[in-house]
Image (tube, rainbow, N blue to C red):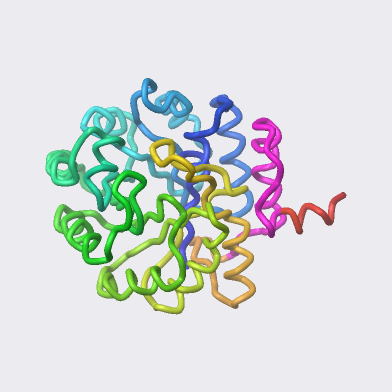
Amino acid sequence: MRIVEVGPRDGLQNEPIPISTEEKVQFIQRLADAGVTEIEATSFVSPKWVPKLGDAADLWPALPVGPIYSALVPNRRGFETALNLGVMKIALFTAASDAFTQRNINRTVAESLIEFGEILSQRPAGMRVRGYVSTAFDCPFCGPVAPAQVRPVVESLLELGCDEISIGDTLGTANPSRTRALARELSDVPNLFWHFHDTYGRAVANVMAAMESGVGIGFDASAGGLGGCPYAPGATGNLATEDLVCLLESEGISIDNGIGSGIDQVRLALASVPILERLGRPVSAKSQAAILSQFR
């Protein structure tokens, strides 16, 4: 399985205390030193809407050499900025519910897809594109989302040229049976990732359900369980990368990080500690806490 580390972007965007560019670079370096090779580093979004990521243009040139980096691009202006900085993997963001995209990017799902088509028409050779489908289980504004409602959005993103799709459990309300149901609906979708939040403590159970369904090639996760969605009230914390890595290794499932050495669980557990301390947050990821207890 592949792991896309989203802590520097999805993990920090909603935190109340700003993290400096230098601290972010150090955080990313520690993740890279632990063996993490796919990292969503930032978002080229207006500082007015997500001020914690307002340093994207300064951060990008300072990123450590090694990992494959991606950045969220919410609109054409963000794409142009990313393009000028040499970003070669972008993520586009839509959802399975109009109510959510209206609150998040001020567009309907259909309108977001039209803009994505315009963006991708300017895509340079070699640029890879990820398509996010948020609210794939529940929307905070209109309630439950049926699997059949998710599929056409996924199909549209693939038709536009997205290389991979990330399915978002935005509120952390998914459970294993609903994960299996959505997996059946998307069983023929290539290069599918799952993005679970851990609001109700079910993220690891959902990972197991997704793997047992045989659908998907990887998962998004955030070191230290950092994050949540600023447009989804009550959605706290992503699936912790430490818990995901521990689960995969305990099940004998290899992590494809492209360098053949796997992920060092001790270094990974230590990677987010300075950020957690800066934010005044306790260690909450179970595997991280267990590993760190060995050093006390």
Q: Is residue 122 visible?
A: no
Which residue lies at the image location 32% right of the left edge and 52% below the top edge? 143
Depth order, front residue of 117/10 = 10
The answer to whether 136 appears left or right of 5 in the picture is left
Most distant residue in the top direction: 48
The answer to whether 205 appears left or right of 145 in the picture is right
> Which corner quadrant of the image does residue 141 belong to?
top left
x%, y% of residue 193? 38, 61
x%, y% of residue 40? 44, 44
Compared to residue 123, the image places residue 240 above or below, namely below
Depth order, front residue of 274/206 = 206
| Chief SS of the magenta region | helix
Depth order, front residue of 59/293 = 293
In magenta stretch: residue 272: yes
Q: Is residue 26 visible?
A: yes
x%, y% of residue 231? 38, 37
The answer to whether 282 appears left or right of 215 in the picture is right
x%, y% of residue 138? 35, 55
In magenta stretch: residue 282: yes
Compared to residue 168, the image places residue 80 above or below, namely above
- How many labels sit on residues? 0
Which residue lies at the image location 70% right of the left edge and 54% below the top edge? 288
Which residue lies at the image location 41% right of the left edge and 61% below the top edge? 194
Question: Which region shows up in magenta?
Answer: 261-288
